[in-house]
Amino acid sequence: MILVVDDDDSSRFVLRSLLEPSGHVLVEAPHLEAALDILNADVLPDIVLTDLGMPDVAGEALIFSLRRHPRTTTIPLVVISDDLAAAAALQESGSVDAVIVKPFDPGLVMRCVADMERKATLATRAGAGAD
């Protein structure tokens, strides 16, 4: 499952149109509170795609929240944003796993999601072997 956090309906629609035909299950959150509700459920997403520039609360708040909690710290995070400087700073700090600049190339999104799926699978296997 992929969680898409973006206040822009059209961005969420484009990502859904791009990823669902490839067999991905998407859950959408238009703001931080909706994303946190989804993340508090029993089943966590395999990947989180988030925008940075949302009204009220920036995407950084979601990123920092996910990285603080042991239950969500290994979920691959991808920033999809038009704020390249802020996104690059988050990637350089290790807070996010990848950055995609808006407007985005569909092929790049697909490759990035495939890479993050591999990362999530490896993290799951490593966690299962830790017992």
Image (spheres, grey):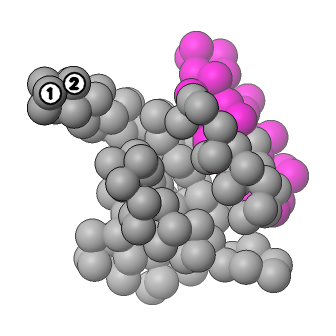
* Quadrant of res 85: bottom left
Kindly give the residue lying farthest to the front in the view shown.
Answer: 131
Q: Is residue 79 left or right of residue 59?
A: left
Residue drawn where x is 28% and y is 29% of the image: 124
Q: Residues within 10 Å of mark 1 (few under 14, many from 20)?
A: few
Q: Residues within 10 Å of mark 2 (few under 14, many from 20)?
A: few
Residue drawn where x is 42% and y is 60% of the image: 69
Indicate yes or no whether the magenta region holds residue 5. yes
* Quadrant of res 119: top left
Q: Is residue 50 left or right of residue 123?
A: right
The spot of residue 101 in percent (x, y) is 52, 64
Residue 125 to residue 32: above or below: above
Q: In terms of secondary structure, where does tag 2 sit?
A: helix
Residue drawn where x is 60% and y is 58% of the image: 50
Amino acid, disc 2: Ala
Which span is picked out in magenta? 1-27
Marks 1/2: CA–CA distance: 6 Å
The spot of residue 75 in percent (x, y) is 40, 46
Q: Which residue is mark 2?
A: 128
Q: Answer yes or no: do the residues labelled 1 and 2 have beta carbons within 8 Å? A: yes
Tell me the quadrant of the picture where the N terminus can be found: top right
Residue 113 to residue 12: above or below: above
The spot of residue 77 in percent (x, y) is 44, 54
Tell me the quadrant of the picture where the C terminus can be found: top left
**Do we see residue 81 in this rendering?**
no
